[in-house]
Amino acid sequence: VSNTKMMLRMGTWAPLGPDVPIRNILFVLLTVGGLLLVMMTFVHFYPRILAGLLRAKTLFMALSSLIVIWGLVSWLSVGQVFGWLPG
């Protein structure tokens, strides 16, 4: 299915302009193929990634919480996020 869509896309989509059909075909092949390769690699290694994260779930949750707090501080400012803390 994805190969069929990629072949159809190569004939209709000209991201580099209509003047360079060979470069467009290579660009589409590399772009779509690269994305599919990344996704397939992630699917292949997902059980190992999940097992590792579940083994270190406390550390993973702590780092995730730090990223969320960092985002809140960046968005709202330190005073608004931590203003409720005493002196």
Image: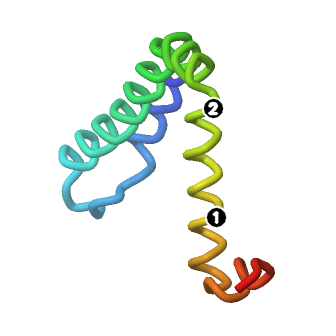
Badge 2 crowding class, 10 Å Cα cut-off, few under 14, some 14 to 19, many 20 or more, is few
| Location of residue 15 (image quadrant) | bottom left
- Measured as percent of width and height from the top left, residue 2 is found at 52, 24
Q: Is residue 14 above or below residue 51?
A: below
Q: Is residue 19 above or below residue 13?
A: below
Q: Is residue 72 above or below residue 14?
A: below
| Location of residue 7 (image quadrant) | top left
- Measured as percent of width and height from the top left, residue 10 is found at 38, 40
* Element at label 2: helix
Amino acid type at image mark 2: Thr
Q: Nearer the viewer, residue 66 or 11?
A: 66
The residue indicated by pointer 1 is 69
* Element at label 1: helix
Amino acid type at image mark 1: Ile
Q: Residue at x 62, y 19 (%)?
A: 54
Q: Nearer the viewer, residue 28 or 61?
A: 61
Q: Quadrant of the N terminus?
A: top right
Give how far apart the Cα atoms at labels 2 and 1 are: 16 Å
Q: Which mark is residue 58?
A: 2
Q: Which mark is residue 78?
A: none
- Residue 62, can we see it? yes
Badge 1 crowding class, 10 Å Cα cut-off, few under 14, some 14 to 19, many 20 or more, is some
Q: Residue at x 51, y 17 (%)?
A: 52
Q: Residue at x 70, y 78 (%)?
A: 82
- Measured as percent of width and height from the top left, residue 45 is found at 46, 14
First reached walking from the N terminus: tag 2 or tag 1: 2
Q: Quadrant of the C terminus?
A: bottom right
* Mark in the foreground, 2 or 1: 2
